Image (cartoon, coloured by chain):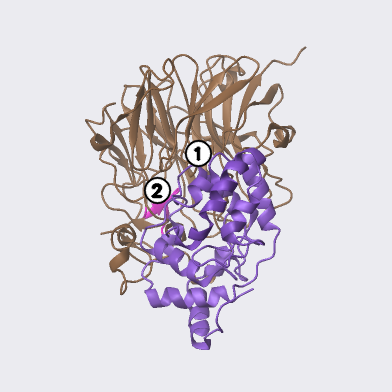
Amino acid sequence: MIRTAVGLVALIAFGAAHAQDKPKPPPAWHQGKPPAMADSKLAPHAGRMTETPRSEIPIDNLKLPPGFAVEIWATGIPGARAMALGDKGKIYVGTRIIGRVYEITDEGDRRTSRVVVDKLTQPAGVAFADGSLYVMAIDKVLRFDGIENNPNDQPMDLTAKFNLPPLQHHNWKYIRFVPDKKLYVPFGSPCNICEPTAEYGQIRRYNPDGSGMEVLARGVRNSVGFDFHPKTGELWFTDHGRDWMGDDGPQDELNRLSKTGLNFGFPYCHAQGVPDRDIKKADPCKDVTKPVALMGPHAAVMGVQFYTGKMFPAEYRDTMLIVRKGSWNRSKPFGFDVVNVRASADGKNAKVTPFMTGFVDAKEGTYKFSGRPAYLLQMPDGALLVSDEQLGAIYRVSYAAPKK
Amino acid sequence: MTSRPCKGRWALLTALLVSAAAAQDRVPLCAACHGADGNSETPGIPSIAGQPKLFLETQLVLFREEVRVSPQMQPAVKGLSDREITRLAEHYAALSARPARNEPADPAQVKRGMALAQELHCGSCHLPDLRGRQQIPRLAAQREDYLTESMLAYRDNRRSGGDTIMAAALYGLSGADIRALAHYLSRLR
């Protein structure tokens, strides 16, 4: 059973028709909302499902350190999230509500896009390996072989092998191959705060065909971004903190998986050792691996990219760029930016500094944001692509040393 | 929902569909079921006047993408561009919502519906006046029969597309609760 602060989440999916006498849980993102906040009007921000014309993208608002430049690289791809680079340079982009996966082709002076597959339930996970595109929706896994050569390729349905659990909340995916040709897949906790059953709240890896599943990390709330350390190969992943515990936390996390089987604390212990207010147990933080860095309250920390290119200045080599899509469960906005995180390979001495800002007017203190960055992709030339889920666009960040 | 409510209008619909592809103007097609001013007089068909623009836009896209499944709406939105969808959303968002011509309100049902709306915190997202915002629809003055059927569909996981939030919000409500809520909401302005 899943025990929640206020109700029984598992029954939402399975028992609604027979539920006349059962307690009523609030929506999954609403669980753990205290009586004092019952009338709070904070709610997840609306996405935009229609194309945003290039002329309506306020690119001039975006700020970067000296020497860096940003341009609008692709538009007209509503809901753009994670990006995967094909062997021949095509880029595949996942989405959530709109149900599409896009293919972007670089035509030199412009980019064109087409829909590879649609009508899926939140196909947020895209990965590319050995000529094949892998798409993971909440309830489906598809493989498109040779997609870059054959646009009409019909997918192989691998769903049965992956044994995906049924609850949808926090179970949209971020997926990646590397470095060992296995596919890394998070399975979020299907609630704001609850004790998830055994198939949720974890990060797994599989062989590419769905066999050989291993659970790598537990106690994970909602991880939708990770990368592998360029020197150690270890998995570094972001995780969203719970809601409805006030404006200041618990903060989102950047974690490091130094060995298989670590527990990252959810739902009992958050951030650097904050016991949960609703789900309690003795010694809640015992044997919990603490984060490398706190990423800010309700920041919605997303894509992680270890920068290994040669275009950016040398001090960026092997440091991380991390996206914070921006808060909703907080009276004033936090995040809506890309930060640079430096830490030693053992996860010590982490330092978070702003990198790309200007998506929200911080001075205003209101939720008037112009975009919401989501994911990063380092290109072969060392430039960095940044997807904007709100505006359905991709930006390209490049660097040129200032002229002496 | 079935196509029964608009059955007598299929000839008109078909004719409009054919011309709409060229004329790029589907307001007359929408009006055939949703009412000339976006306030539906057709059983089972929602009023769309005064709905938030983003809500209308999102639902039209979800119909077009066949993420939200409706045998009536799928042909009606087929081939619409994003720009046309936005224009339709703006058109209907700007019109005034008015309650359907219901029979007089039952004070006991209104009282029960109001109490339930408060208990369920409908106003947290739909706002205290229940006129909706952004991606969240207006409930005030919506047709009672449409509200009832929509809430039952959410509760029983029959509503495709979009988020899972409403299914969870209505979890465990009885049919009588839902009818009382719909009775109350449909009579708000």
Viewer-nearest residue: A4 or A132 = A132
- Secondary structure mostly seen in magenta is loop
SS of the residue under disc 2: loop
Residue B156: quadrant of the picture: bottom left
Residue at disc 1, secondary structure: strand
Percent from the top left, x then y, of residue B58? 56, 49
Q: Position of residue B83 (x, y in %)?
A: 65, 40
Q: Chain of mark 1?
A: A
**Distance between mark 1 and mark 2 Cα atoms:** 13 Å
Outermost residue, top side = A404
Let me know if residue B46 appears in the view. yes
Question: Is A33 left, or right, of B20 in this rendering?
Answer: left
Instruction: Please identify which colour was used for chain A in the image.
Output: brown
Rendered-image quadrant of the C terminus of chain B: bottom right
Question: Does the magenta run of residues contain A269?
Answer: yes
Which residue: 49% across, 83% down? B109
Q: Percent from the top left, x then y, of residue A365? A: 70, 52
Res A245 visible:
no
The residue at the far left in this view is: A212
Along the viewing direction, whichever of B17 and A112 lies nearer the viewer: B17
| Residue bearing the label numbered 1 | A302
A85 is within the stretch colored magenta: no
At label 1, the amino acid type is: Met
Q: Which mark is residue A221?
A: 2
The chain assigned the colour purple in the figure is B
Residues in magenta? A267-277
Residues at badges 1 and 2 in contact (C-beta under 8 Å)?
no
Vertical placement of residue A187 versus A59, above or below: below
Q: Nearer the viewer, residue A247 or A92?
A: A92
Q: Earlier in the sequence, mark 1 or mark 2?
A: 2
What is the chain identity of the residue bearing mark 2?
Answer: A
